[in-house]
Structure formats: C-alpha cells, structure tokens
Image (cartoon, helix red, strand yellow):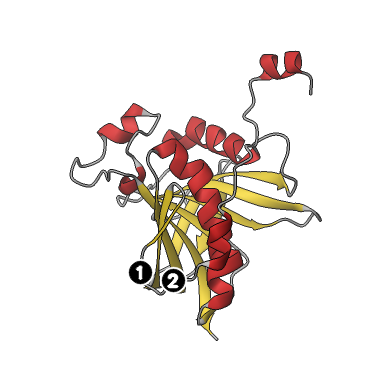
C-alpha cells in the first residue's frame, strides 16, 4: 500500500513494540506482582462457574507482524453495531477472543460484549461461548488506556504464553485466549460515553485488564 492509498483509506496499522527481554527470565508466583518496563503483571487462578455468552464482530487475521491492524478493524466494526446487540448483560463486560481459523497461517478475532442470551438473526453478529472451568487470569496495568491495550497487552500475552505457563503448575487446554475488559480499564478511554457510564470509584488509575486462558493442573 502506498502512502497516498493509506491516507485515502485511513485503516489502522499494526504496531511494533520493543520487547522487554527481562520478562523471559523472570518467573513469579501466583499473587505476586511483577513490575516490568511500563507494565505491572499479576497472576491468579479462577473457577468460572457459568458459561460466558458473547456476541460481536469477527475478523480473520494474518499471523504476520506487518500490515493492517485487523484487531483494530474488528473493534471499529463492533463499535458501529454495539448498540444493536440485544440482551446485553448488566455486568458491562467486553471481550476480545483469539481463536483458530480453518485457514493455515490465520486466526480469528472476535470483538464482543457479554450477553444474557443469544437472540439475534443479524448475520453480521457472531456468537461465542467461553465455557465454564478453571482459568489462569493474568491481570496487568499500564499508564493509560492506549498503552494498556497496545504495548502492555502485547507484553502480557507474550509473557503469559511463552514464560509463565511453561514454568507453572498448569497446562493451557483451550484453543482460545480471552481479553477481558470491564470498568477497570476505562481510564483515558477514547469514547467519553464509556467513561461516563462507569462508577467513579471503579475506574482505576492506572487502568488494568485481564487475559484469561483455560487450564488444568499438570
């Protein structure tokens, strides 16, 4: 894509983040915070007692690092239809789900909101269930919403999958990972209506969020 073509289309592009190499050599116990470059990470284990129903927009993504930020495209399309999604749960949770694609070298990404039931015939909307079970929860924070959902998310995901889990007492058994967004992440959110809807005492400073993967004990 030439610069002039990009200016006309105004699509989000994938970003490259400087990795914190020290994270590869630092292991922490459950409940012990890890302070790294621009991010604080902490791990816990949680039993989810009920399925989490989600509804939103799916985009198929390339495994490569360069090019269009397809995850950003999914969230932009989700924002456009969010108000039309029926039976949204009162808990006000949004999730980003990475899960396998049938095409080699690709994966699917769902930008979604939690719902109480599946009650829509809208072909644009994808239904997904996060099953009840045992989950490792990676909670992390950053200075602001942009850093939280970009560089910090990238570092936390890499540390969870590449370093923490292989050295833990748990094996990942799901083929999906859940990015869990609730009121805690809304500090400096670019959509003012999101911030205004949240209780003041729940908006965290700095903002934080979770990554969850389903596990079993080794």
Locate residue 207 relative to residue 55 in the image: left or right: left
Residue at figure coordinates x 53%, y 38% from the top left: 75
Locate residue 7 relative to residue 135 in the image: left or right: right
Task: Locate the N terminus and report the quarter of the image it occupies.
Answer: top right
Q: Residue 74, how many percent across, how many down?
A: 59, 39
Relative to the observer, which residue lies in front, 210 or 38? 38
Element on which disc 2 rests: loop
Relative to the observer, which residue lies in front, 123 or 200? 200
Relative to the observer, which residue lies in front, 215 or 18? 18
Cβ–Cβ below 8 Å for labels 1 and 2? yes
Q: Is residue 13 above or below residue 184?
A: above
Q: Which residue is mark 2?
A: 28
Q: Residue 61, how many percent across, how many down?
A: 70, 45
Is residue 169 visible from the viewing direction of this image?
yes
Q: Is residue 108 above or below residue 71?
A: below
Q: Residue 20, how many percent across, how many down?
A: 55, 52
Residue at figure coordinates x 59%, y 75% from the top left: 166
Kindly indicate the quadrant of the structure image that contains residue 191: top left
Q: Which residue is mark 1?
A: 32
Residue positioned most to the bottom? 218
Q: Separation of disc 1 and disc 2 at Cα?
A: 6 Å
Numbered badge on residue 134: none
Relative to the observer, which residue lies in front, 205 or 97? 205
Residue at figure coordinates x 46%, y 40% from the top left: 147
Residue at figure coordinates x 26%, y 36% from the top left: 197
Q: Residues within 10 Å of mark 1 (few under 14, many from 20)?
A: few
Task: Locate the C terminus and report the quarter of the image it occupies.
Answer: bottom right
Q: Residue 101, how many percent across, how many down?
A: 72, 55
Q: Residues within 10 Å of mark 2 (few under 14, many from 20)?
A: some
Residue positioned most to the right? 104
Q: How many marks?
A: 2
């Amino acid at each position: 894509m030439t610069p002039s073509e990009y200016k006309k289309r105004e699509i989000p592009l994938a970003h490259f983040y400087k990795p914190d190499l020290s994270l590869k050599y630092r292991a922490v116990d459950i409940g012990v915070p890890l302070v790294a470059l621009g991010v604080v990470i902490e791990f816990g284990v949680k039993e989810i007692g009920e399925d989490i129903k989600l509804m939103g927009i799916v985009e198929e993504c390339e495994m490569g690092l360069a090019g269009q930020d397809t995850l950003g495209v999914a969230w932009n399309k989700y924002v456009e239809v969010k108000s039309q999604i029926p039976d949204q749960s009162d808990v006000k949770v949004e999730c980003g789900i990475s899960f396998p694609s049938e095409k080699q070298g690709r994966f699917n990404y769902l930008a979604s909101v939690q719902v109480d039931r599946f009650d829509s015939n809208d072909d644009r909307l994808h239904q997904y269930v996060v099953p009840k079970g045992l989950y490792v929860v990676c909670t992390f924070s950053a200075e602001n919403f942009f850093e939280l959902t970009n560089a910090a998310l990238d570092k936390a995901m890499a540390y969870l999958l590449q370093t923490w889990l292989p050295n833990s007492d748990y094996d990942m058994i799901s083929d999906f990972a859940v990015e869990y967004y609730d009121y805690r992440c809304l500090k400096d959110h670019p959509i003012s209506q999101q911030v205004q809807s949240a209780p003041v005492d729940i908006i965290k400073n700095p903002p934080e969020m979770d990554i969850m993967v389903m596990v079993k004990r080794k």
